[in-house]
Amino acid sequence: MMILLASVLSILMIVAAVWVLITPNILKAIIVFAIVSLVASVLFIFMHAPDVAITEASIGAGITSAIFILSYKRISE
């Protein structure tokens, strides 16, 4: 069951990463990038690496996405 869920999450992560590359809307790309990072942190939990998962969720999904959104808002003004 865990292997199936990990496989589905991995496929979701690949599809979302490709969507980030091809979408013309930058704000949507930033949000999907955050989702990719959150899925990666869930996969790290499945691999029994909670410290890496917490770091990925806080830095990858949280801080990086916030910096991207703030930069996008600043540039688009």
Image (cartoon, rainbow, N blue to C red):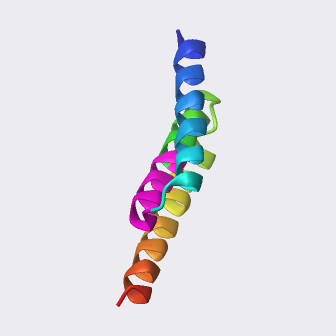
Q: x%, y% of residue 75?
A: 44, 87
Q: Quadrant of residue 18?
A: top right
Q: Quadrant of residue 48?
A: top right
- At horizontal 40% and vertical 88% (from top left) the residue drawn is 74
* Image position of 48 with respect to 60: above or below: above
- At horizontal 58% and vertical 34% (from top left) the residue drawn is 43
Q: Nearer the viewer, residue 76 or 68?
A: 76
Q: Nearer the viewer, residue 58 or 28?
A: 28
Is 38 on the left-hand or right-hand side of 11? Answer: left
* Image position of 63 with respect to 40: above or below: below
Please tell me whether the stretch drawn in magenta is mainly helix, strand or loop.
helix
Q: x%, y% of residue 52?
A: 63, 48
- At horizontal 47% and vertical 55% (from top left) the residue drawn is 34
Q: x%, y% of residue 64?
A: 52, 68
Q: How many marks overall?
A: 0
Is 62 on the left-hand or right-hand side of 49? Answer: left
* Image position of 64 with respect to 9: above or below: below
Q: Is residue 73 magenta?
A: no
- Which residues make up the magenta segment? 25-37
Look at the image and tell me in which quarter the C terminus lies. bottom left
Q: Nearer the viewer, residue 23 or 42?
A: 23
- At horizontal 43% and vertical 79% (from top left) the residue drawn is 72
